């Protein structure tokens, strides 16, 4: 790997961590997103993601698009207001889970 390829890239660090956590390769990510693998080299070198590519990555990793946009530094956590975006059901108490379900059901009516 050349010096150019090892540039500090928080976006690529995030993507690589997600790949590792899911035992996925860049070929898998390319297949799921439709992005050419050369894009990943650009990310390794420090180029950021666009809004469209962040959405594709979010879908490929089955993550909240808002969380991925924050990680891509396209929006701030405050802008995403991640506290209310999509709570992790496993982290909620029974009462909180019921309240979240009620909130979502009320939003649909």
Image (spheres, rainbow, N blue to C red):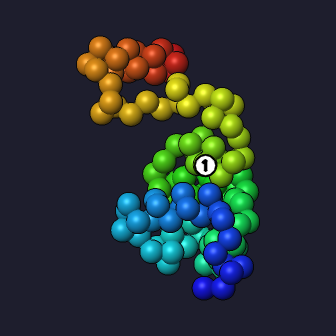
Could you say whether the residue bearing mark 1 is in a helix, strand or loop? Answer: helix
> Residue 87: x and y, percent?
43, 30
Work out which residue is located at the far front of the displayed protein and give it: 3
Split into 4 quadrants, where in the image is the N terminus?
A: bottom right
Q: Quadrant of residue 78 in the image?
A: top right
* Rendered residue at 45%/16% (across/down): 103
The residue that mark 1 highlights is: 71
Left or right: residue 13 versus residue 103 is right
Work out which residue is located at the far bottom of the displayed protein and give it: 1
**Total numbered labels:** 1
| 3 up-or-down from 34: above or below | below
| 91 up-or-down from 65: above or below | above
Q: Nearer the viewer, residue 56 or 79?
A: 79
Left or right: residue 17 versus residue 89 is right
Q: Quadrant of residue 76 in the image?
A: top right
* Rendered residue at 46%/59% (across/down): 18
| 47 up-or-down from 100: above or below | below
> Residue 66: x and y, percent?
60, 40
* Rendered residue at 48%/32% (across/down): 86
Work out which residue is located at the far left of the displayed protein and give it: 94
> Residue 2: x and y, percent?
66, 85
Regarding residue 83, the answer to whether it shows in the image is yes
* Rendered residue at 51%/69% (across/down): 29
């Amino acid at each position: 790997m050349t010096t150019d390829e090892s540039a500090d890239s928080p976006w690529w660090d995030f993507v690589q961590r997600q790949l590792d956590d899911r035992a996925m390769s860049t070929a898998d990510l390319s297949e799921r997103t439709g992005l050419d693998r050369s894009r990943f080299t650009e990310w390794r070198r420090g180029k950021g993601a666009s809004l469209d590519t962040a959405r594709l990555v979010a879908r490929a990793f089955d993550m909240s698009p808002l969380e991925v946009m924050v990680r891509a530094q396209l929006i701030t956590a405050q802008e995403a207001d991640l506290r209310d975006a999509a709570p992790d059901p496993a982290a909620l108490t029974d009462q909180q889970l019921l309240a979240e379900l009620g909130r979502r059901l009320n939003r649909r009516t």
